[in-house]
Amino acid sequence: MNRAQHARLARALIAKCGENDSRADLDVAAAECRIGKSQLSDCQCPNGVAYMPADVIADLESYCGVPIYSSALAGLFDAPKAQGNLHDACCEVTESAAKLQASVRQAQADGALTPREHDDIAKVIGAVEATLEEAKAVQRAMEANPRTLKAV
């Protein structure tokens, strides 16, 4: 995992901590771990030298209830298993989302939604989520293998 990826994960985790609080994201995150706002801010800088310490990751993920950073790190072990083309995977997401839209439109054409239609829509939503997870796996695999990314 490169420096920019660490910074992106730190930003996402800090933002998640402040999601349901009126205080600034850094204020919330700093109140929930052992390091201060300045150090947390440094962890978000892709050109900096600071990395978020493991215990701080654990504290913040525990606070927000979502393993944003640690699941990405754990996903590195699974990354080589993900095969595919990111473009194709994203097209699958779009196509499955279009099927969801068509299903909802058809189900609500009569102005009512039956329990069976509701269940059918839930299945289509599951399919959309599955294609999105596959696209994310392909993207993580690409990030884990720097040879697949172009330097810009």
Image (tube, rainbow, N blue to C red):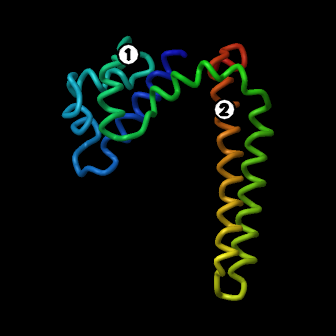
Looking at this view, name the residue that lies furthest to the top. Answer: 49
Label 2 with label 1: CB-CB less than 8 Å? no
Extreme-bottom residue of the structure? 110
Residue 97, image x and y in percent?
A: 71, 57
Write down the quadrant of residue 44 in the picture: top left
Local SS, label 1: loop
Of the two numbered discs 2 and 1 on the same chain, state the one appearing first in sequence: 1
Question: Residue sitting at 46 percent across and 26 percent down?
Answer: 70
Position of residue 107 relative to residue 1, above or below, is: below
Numbered disc in front, either 2 or 1: 2
Q: Is residue 149 above or below residue 99?
A: above
Identify which residue is drawn at 67% across, 24% down: 141
Q: Amino acid at mark 2?
A: Ala
Residue bearing mark 2: 137
Q: Is residue 119 above or below residue 50?
A: below
Q: Amino acid at mark 1?
A: Tyr
Categorize mark 2 by other alpha carbons within 10 Å: few (<14), some (14-19), many (20+).
many
Image quadrant assignment for residue 115: bottom right
Q: Secondary structure at mark 2?
A: helix
**Quarter of the N terminus within the rendering:** top right
Position of residue 101 measured from the top left corner of the image (x, y, whole percent): 71, 66
The structure residue drawn at horizontal position 35% and vertical position 25%, both measured from the top left corner, is 57
What residue would you read off at disc 1? 51
> Left or right: where does residue 136 sit relative to residue 87?
left
Q: Which mark is residue 24?
A: none
